[in-house]
Structures are given as C-alpha cells and as structure tokens.
Image (cartoon, helix red, strand yellow):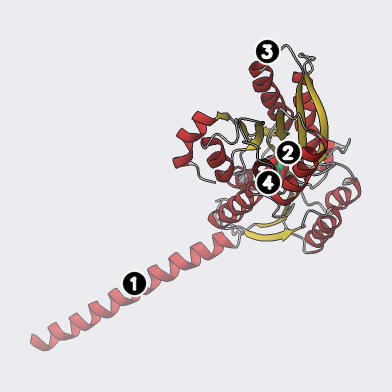
Amino acid sequence: MKRFGKISLVLSLTLSMLMLGACSSNNSGGAGEENAGGNSGTKSTKSITLGFSQVGAESGWRSANTKSIQDSAKEAGYTLKFSDAQQKQENQIKALRSFIQQKVDVISFSPVVESGWDTVLKEAKDAGIPVILTDRAVDSKDTSLYVTFLGSDFVEEGRKAGQWLTEQYKDAAEDINIVELQGTTGSAPANDRMQGFKEVISSNPNLKIIASQTGDFTRAKGKEVMQAFLKAHKDIDVLYAHNDDMALGAIQAIEAAGLKPGEDIIIISVDAVKDGMQAASEGKINFIVECNPLLGPQLMKVVQDVVDGKSVEARIVTEETTFTSEQAKEALPNRQY
Ligand code: AHR
C-alpha cells in the first residue's frame, strides 16, 4: 500500500509537471505567432521604425520638442532613427534619403525652411513610405506628398501677439516704434508669425515696425541683432521676438544698454518655455504667446494610425494659450518645459 502510494505520487507529480510544461510552451508559442503576425486574428504587433529629422537644437523649445519625441517613441515601443540637421536643409534632405534607403516604416520631420522639398518627398512617396510633417509646414503644392501636418497655427500666434499690442496702444496718439526679431529666414514660423502680427497691427497706423531682422531663433543672435537695433534707433518702444530665446538674448542687450526690459521697452515673444516664463514672471517680458513643443504623444498616435491604414486628418492643430506677466507667474511652478 505504502509502495503503491509512492508510485502514484511520483506519477501524478510527473503528470502535473508535463502539463505545466505543455501550458507554458502553448503560451509562448501563441505569443510568438502573434508577434510574427500569425493567423491569430489579432492586430500585428510588428515593431514600427520611425525616421525623424529634427531641425537642430537652436532653442529651449526645440530641446523640449526633441525630448518629447524621443520619450514618446520609447513609450510606444517604436525604433526611432533620430537625426539632427543643425539648422541646415541639406542635412535634412540627406537624412530623409537615408531613411528611405533604410526602408523605415514612416518618416517624420520638422522642415527647417518651407521651400525645396518636392523632390525628396516624391522619392519617399515612390518608395511607399508615408511622411508626416510636424511643427513646421512645407509649401509644396502637391499635398499628396505627405499624409498630414501636425503642429501650431503660426499665423494665429502672430495675430495673438498683434492683438495684445493693439489693445495696449489703442489710445496712443503718437507713433509706437516696434523692432522685430524674426526667426530663421524662410521658415514657416518666421513667415507666419510676421504675417499674422502685421495683419493685426495694420489696423492702427501708429504702430510702426521700424526695423526687422532675423535672429535665427537663437539667444546669441537675438542679443547681437538687438545690440545693432539699439545702436541704430534711440527710440524703440516695443520688441516683438518670434521666440523666447531671441527675446532672452535681446534682454541682455537691453540691460547692457542701461535700459529696463519690460518697462523702457515692451517685449512680446512666442513659445512660453520655462526661461521665457521666468523672465515674464519678473516683468522683463510683457506678453508671451504659447507654442507647444510637446508633440511626441500625438505624433506617435498618428504614426500608429498611418501604419494601421486608418485615415488621419490632413491638418492637426495644437491647442495653445497666451500669458501676461501675472499669468506667467502663476503658471511657472507647473510648467513642464
Ligand atoms: O518651429 C517652432 C519654432 O522653432 C519655435 O518657436 C522656436 O523656438 C523654434 O526654434
């Protein structure tokens, strides 16, 4: 009886182990088949390779944008091939061609300038690789060359800046002299922020742009150009900077000239990155139009939809707000970028 009991215990243990083994190999086998796109009927989980060509690292906005894209791609489990163009279109074109050669699943990029993309976009289209524009647009007439454009409405940003200024000077009886620090020449944000701003301030003939020059979206250039503006014009009332970094560089030049930014010269800028918001909360920048760089999560969602063959909107606009100095002070502690 004892002996029989032992044999049956060994037998039942062996049986259970065999069954466990069978169960676990069924599980891994099933998952493996799904991963390989087997006939399980569920969606293929084949990993996506995304080629992304970034403009550069010219501003706080750009650094936040890069981090958002890298973090979101990681979170989504995509393989990200990231390339920094150092503000040069030829580098971006090279990067796009290399993505095409590597047969990535999707290409996305933030074009440094608006013009000159048709040839390389056509190459991507011929290779069957969908392209998603983020942040900045291209001026290609053939909109079939890209799937969608995800980013801000830069003309609207310029309008918001102009509306605030127009309101501040609605009762002005004399000329208000404005200097403008433009973004990178030929870029969508520089073109559009200038257009929207001009469109609105033209309603008040007292608001005059007396000088306008590019500061290439960088702090160093913003400072340099503002120094030149201050030398050439003794009567500057307002600075309109197309981004915070240029405004921050200009503030250094204004202070070095013995003037008070935000008081002697009213300052409006765009972006609302932490450093800009800090300057606004100290009263050195009077008004900031927000431009949201955290496009990563939305971009990854669009990438997935495109790979899954779902239809996507041809234009996806980012929601944004504005900040006066007081509002910046309030918002600063919770600012993510
Ligand atoms: O394209 C967005 C613009 O590019 C941001 O406003 C600026 O800071 C950046 O460099």
Outermost residue toward the left? 1
Residue 82: name its quadrant. bottom right
Distance, label 4 to label 3, CA atoms, is 29 Å
Tag count: 4
Q: Are marks 1 and 3 in contact (CB under 8 Å)?
A: no
Decide: few, some or many residues near mark 2? Use Cα within 10 Å; few <14, some 14-19, many ≥20.
many
Q: Comparing marks 1 and 3, which lies closer to the viewer?
A: 3
Sequence-first tag of 3 and 2: 2
Residue 143: name its quadrant. top right
Distance, label 1 to label 3, CA atoms, is 83 Å
- Name above or below for residue 132 compared with residue 267: below
Residue at x-position 63% and y-position 49%: 60
Decide: few, some or many residues near mark 1? Use Cα within 10 Å; few <14, some 14-19, many ≥20.
few
Task: Kindly state the secondary structure of the residue where label 1 is placed.
Answer: helix
Residue at x-position 83% and y-position 33%: 211
Q: Are marks 3 and 2 in contact (CB under 8 Å)?
A: no
Sequence-first tag of 4 and 3: 3
Q: Amino acid at mark 2?
A: Phe
Distance, label 1 to label 2, CA atoms, is 54 Å
**Residue 249 disc label:** 4
Residue to which mark 3 is pinned: 170
Sequence-first tag of 1 and 4: 1
Decide: few, some or many residues near mark 4? Use Cα within 10 Å; few <14, some 14-19, many ≥20.
many
Residue to which mark 2 is pinned: 149
- Locate residue 268, reporting x and y percent: 66, 31
Say whether mark 1 is within 8 Å of ligand 1: no
- Locate residue 185, reporting x and y percent: 84, 42
- Name above or below for residue 24 compared with residue 76: below
- Name above or below for residue 134 compared with residue 14: above
Q: Amino acid at mark 1?
A: Met
Task: Kindly state the secondary structure of the residue where label 3 is placed.
Answer: loop
